[in-house]
């Protein structure tokens, strides 16, 4: 009997890539999304990639406890992967209540409904942002979390704690938190990818939109950091590699392979790249010249962070495999695909 996974926020950038990998791994998937931060482009792309026109899609808001309850009443759900939530760092500083209400209430509703409907397995989409500015690099899962520098980052820490404390209190559930580093790229088919609304906050969509001419110039926020080339360093993880990590984590839960009732894994490559290295690699991979300029530092940015992914490699059996040049080529192909549809 096929196991069924609910992907909340599954029409979004990472959720759509995870849906593809789950289906290709033989799971049944239900996608539920309130479409507040995406349109149907990626979900349509998922159907084309998988060849499955029958993927159940439910337009709903997980802040609505009744709708969440109904979802679990009408479907036999074996595991939930929770992506649904707002994720713009800057916006969260200006609208903290919107972020606390949406990101916490939606997750609490999911846990409550899962618990009362015998769905034991909850996978939470967390973030390396919980580590703040690390004292020691690379960061392991034991590295201390630092006080969040944004309400968005705080909701990630709070949701981790909500899951941890729920697992401790209720034997009916167990959980895994995956701490993503910097997800970038797009599916090699160029049918799904990152689709930021308005001006992109993140580096790679800003690069591709500059390259396609949607943005005048890429500004590199800071060239005076204490790093080899003066720009910030990050652990850029290909979104397809990241998506596959979710399949390994869900299988760990469904095949009863967890060693503790609540587990955390860093999902990163373990290889730091600087912003400037990424800019240069993007130009090289796609044989183009990018219009960019150095600019002052962006408040809130950490100098450098990258993962020690050993635990995920050993316990999940997952490892990042895609080459950064392929990732940057796929990101560009996706941007060109979007332009071809305009
Ligand atoms: C990366 C580097 C910027 C844009 C955040 C969240 C994290 C995750 C990913 C959300 C930084 C520089 C960026 C630009 C630039 N969550 N940059 N010019 O801030 O590391 O992580 O996004 O989905 O939880 O914290 O990612 O891509 O915004 O920035 O120079 O136009 O690129 O200064 O050094 P970040 P980012």
Image (tube, rainbow, N blue to C red):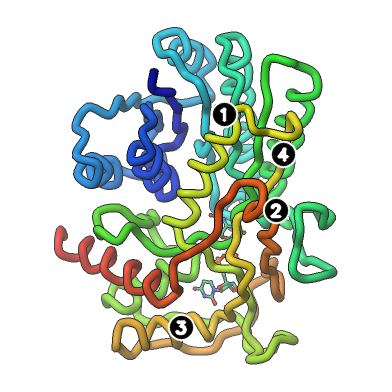
Q: Nearer the viewer, mark 3 or mark 2?
A: 2
Front-lying residue, 18 or 23: 23
The residue pinned by badge 2 equals: 311
Q: Is residue 143 above or below residue 260?
A: below
- Please name the residue that numbered disc 4 is placed on: 263
Distance from mark 3 CB to nearest ligand 1 atom below 8 Å = no
The quadrant where residue 30 appears: top left
Label 4, residues with CA under 10 Å away: few <14, some 14-19, many ≥20: some
SS type, badge 3: helix
Q: Pick whichever of labels 2 and 1 is earlier in the sequence.
A: 1
Q: Earlier in the sequence, mark 4 or mark 1?
A: 1
Image quadrant where one finds the N terminus:
top left
Cα separation, mark 3 vs mark 1, equals 41 Å
Which label sits in the foreground, 2 or 1?
Answer: 1
Residue 44, compared with residue 268, is above or below; it is above
Do callouts 2 and 1 mark residues in contact (Cβ within 8 Å)? no
Kind of element beneath mark 1: loop
Q: Quadrant of residue 284?
A: bottom left
Dot placed on the residue nearer the N-terminal end, 4 or 3: 4
Q: Which quadrant holds residue 200? A: bottom left
Where residue 116 sits in the image (x, y, percent)? 60, 9
Residue drawn at (44%, 13%), measured in percent from left and top? 76
Q: Can you identify the residue that label 3 sits on?
A: 279
Question: Is residue 274 visible in this depiction of the protein?
Answer: yes
> Of 157 and 95, which appears nearest the observer?
157
């Amino acid at each position: 009997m096929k196991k069924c996974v609910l992907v909340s926020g599954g029409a979004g950038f990472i959720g759509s890539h995870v849906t593809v990998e789950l289906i290709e791994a033989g799971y049944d998937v239900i996608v539920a999304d309130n479409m507040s931060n995406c349109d149907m482009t990626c979900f349509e792309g998922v159907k084309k990639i998988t060849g499955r026109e029958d993927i159940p899609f439910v337009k709903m808001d997980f802040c609505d406890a009744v709708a969440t309850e109904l979802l679990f009443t009408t479907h036999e759900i074996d595991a939930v992967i929770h992506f649904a939530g707002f994720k713009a760092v800057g916006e969260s500083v200006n609208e903290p209540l919107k972020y606390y209400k949406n990101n916490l209430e939606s997750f609490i509703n999911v846990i409550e409904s899962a618990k009362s409907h015998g769905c034991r397995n909850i996978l939470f989409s967390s973030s390396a942002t919980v580590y703040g500015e690390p004292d020691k690099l690379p960061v392991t899962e034991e590295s201390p979390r630092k006080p969040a520098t944004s309400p968005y980052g705080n909701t990630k820490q709070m949701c981790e704690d909500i899951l941890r404390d729920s697992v401790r209190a209720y034997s009916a559930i167990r959980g895994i938190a995956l701490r993503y580093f910097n997800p970038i790229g797009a599916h090699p088919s160029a049918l799904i990818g990152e689709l930021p609304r308005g001006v992109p906050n993140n580096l790679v969509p800003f690069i591709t939109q500059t390259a396609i001419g949607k943005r005048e110039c890429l500004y590199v926020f800071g060239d005076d950091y204490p790093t080899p080339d003066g720009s910030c360093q990050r652990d850029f993880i290909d979104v397809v590699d990241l998506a596959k990590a979710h399949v390994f984590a869900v299988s760990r839960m469904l095949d009863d392979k967890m060693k503790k009732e609540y587990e955390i894994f860093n999902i990163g490559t373990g290889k730091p790249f600087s912003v400037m290295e990424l800019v240069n690699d993007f130009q090289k991979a796609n044989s183009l010249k990018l219009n960019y300029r150095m600019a002052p530092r962006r408040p809130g940015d950490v100098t450098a962070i990258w993962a020690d992914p050993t635990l995920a490699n050993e316990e999940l059996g997952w490892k990042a495999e895609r080459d950064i040049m392929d990732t940057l080529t796929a990101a560009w192909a996706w941007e060109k695909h979007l332009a071809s549809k305009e």
